[in-house]
Amino acid sequence: MSIKINCDMGESFGIWKMGLDEQVMQYIDMANLACGFHASDPLIMDFTVKLAKKYDVILGAHPSYQDLMGFGRRSIPCSFEEIKALVLYQISAMAGFCKAHEVKLEYVKPHGALYNDMMKDENIFKAILEAVSSFDKSIKLMILSSNKNELYESFTSTYGISLLYEVFADRNYNDDGSLVSRTLRDAVIDDEKEVIKRVENLKDKGFLNTITGKELFLKTDTICVHGDNEKALDFIKILKKVL
């Protein structure tokens, strides 16, 4: 199985700095670029697109709820049309910077609460699909891989959109394929050796072990890693070699 590394990037804002974009970009395959609603600004968007182009990284838009104060981690009740419009607005802005620098926007990965809500609410999922489809049907949508993949594929076929399946190697999974809630102690795996072992199993055998030890087979196009501290940078380098 060929698996790519994706990472949230371009999340600085004005004089406030977030992440280690310049160090991390050269080790990842796919960059999820903030579009100004949860983080980033026009100068940051422009700079990060140029940085991704320099290292030949696949570019994706990372739209969110309009929530700078909460970093896009708060659910905001929105109508179907509001979701469609806010996603279309953000991917259009990011695509504009991509066009200016002669690179293509390849995919969309919703951020934070919008990502979580998309996976729980069919109406939100379809609103995002409609936004992407109306803009460019060649752009893919990244979603959380689970045992509901066939259901989501049935939705995307209506809109002519392809999916990218994402797995979190450092998060524990329930037997039904959902992520263990962050409110629980064992939600996140901190042991780097254990995470690397999980990535190797995904790459070679196509499964992760759930919180109970069950083998959970998942379609995996990409693994999400977070690159906002020095330890994470070392981990990304190791993971790049593994993959």
Image (cartoon, grey):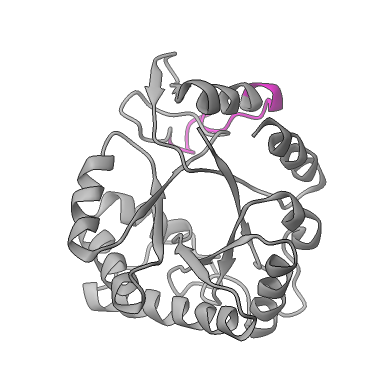
Q: Position of residue 38 (x, y in %)?
A: 54, 70
Q: Residue at x 35, y 31 (%)?
A: 177
Q: In this picture, is 36 found above or below 108?
A: below
Q: Name the residue furthest top.
A: 213
Q: In this picture, is 191 found above or below 212?
A: below
Between 69 and 113, which is closer to the camera in this rendering? 113
The image shows a total of numbered marks equal to 0
Q: In this picture, is 138 found above or below 45?
A: above
Q: Judge whether residue 96 is colored magenta.
A: no
Q: Position of residue 93 (x, y in %)?
A: 51, 83
Q: Quadrant of residue 243?
A: top right
Between 52 and 151, which is closer to the camera in this rendering? 52
Q: In this picture, is 225 found above or below 162?
A: above
Q: Residue at x 77, y 78 (%)?
A: 15
Q: Position of residue 151 (x, y in %)?
A: 20, 45
**Apparent side of residue 103 relative to residue 133 in the rendered image (left or right):** right
Q: Main secondary structure of the magenta part?
A: loop
**Apparent side of residue 239 relative to residue 233 in the rendered image (left or right):** left
Q: Residue at x 23, y 41 (%)?
A: 150
Q: Judge whether residue 190 is colored magenta.
A: yes
Q: Position of residue 152 (x, y in %)?
A: 25, 49
Q: Which residues are magenta?
A: 181-194
Q: Quadrant of residue 82?
A: bottom left
**Apparent side of residue 56 relative to residue 3 in the rendered image (left or right):** right
